[in-house]
Amino acid sequence: MQPIADNQQYYDETFSKLSLSFSEWAEIEFEDCEFHDCNFSESTFKNCKFINCQFSQCNLSLLKIPQTRFFEVSFVACKLVGIDWTQGNWPSFNIDHELTFRQCILNDASFFGLTLNELVLDDCKLHDVDFREGDFKDSSMTYCDFTHSLFMRTDLRRVDFTESTHYNIHVLENSVAGAKFSRFEALNLLETLGIELVD
């Protein structure tokens, strides 16, 4: 029997070791639910809601989320490669969706143009991620690897980048007032200005 069905509401339930890749669901609401060691890779959640849910050690790569809403959702040790987060439903009246990612792989994702204030990215791998035109004020992006990720006209005011590496953030093309950077990695910010550093 399929453990998840369309047009249902699930409250305070735990889903473990589900292997449901290439599946499609619609109009489901999950509240206070936990997902452990589940595989939803290349699946679709359409017009769904995840409220105060936690995913741990799940494979969500290439997940499609058209008009799906996330609020107070945390992902721990999850694989989330190639997700277009811009497909989701992000109501403009709520600028802090309380999303948390810890020890996750988010390569090839897109957050283009999204307003996600106070986003938490901790110890994550974020290669080739698109943050352009986004508003991420007051976020925490610590101990992350931003290799080849894109920042352009991105609002990064008061973002904490402590111990994060490999970012290429042009300080004249992004808002970075009040942001925190580790001293050595901050030298990359000067390189974007064409400044030559000598010992």
Image (tube, rainbow, N blue to C red):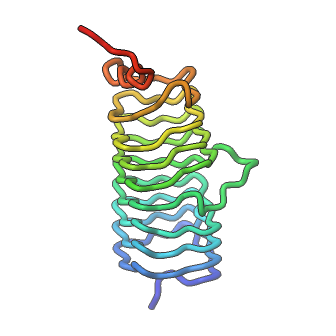
Q: Is residue 82 above or below residue 40?
A: above
Residue at the (60%, 63%) spot, across then down: 87
Residue 177, x across and y down, in percent: 57, 21
Which residue in the rendered view is the most extreme toward the bottom? 1
Residue at the (55%, 73%) spot, across then down: 45
Quarter where residue 108 is shown: bottom left
Residue 24, x across and y down, in percent: 52, 81
Quarter where residue 38 is shown: bottom left
Q: Is residue 146 above or below residue 197?
A: below
The N terminus is located in which quarter?
A: bottom left
Apparent side of residue 196 relative to residue 111 in the rendered image (left or right): left
Apparent side of residue 143 relative to residue 112 in the rendered image (left or right): left
The C terminus is located in which quarter?
A: top left
Residue 162, x across and y down, in percent: 39, 27
Residue at the (46%, 87%) spot, across then down: 2
Q: Nearer the viewer, residue 141 or 53?
A: 141
Q: Is residue 24 above or below residue 104?
A: below
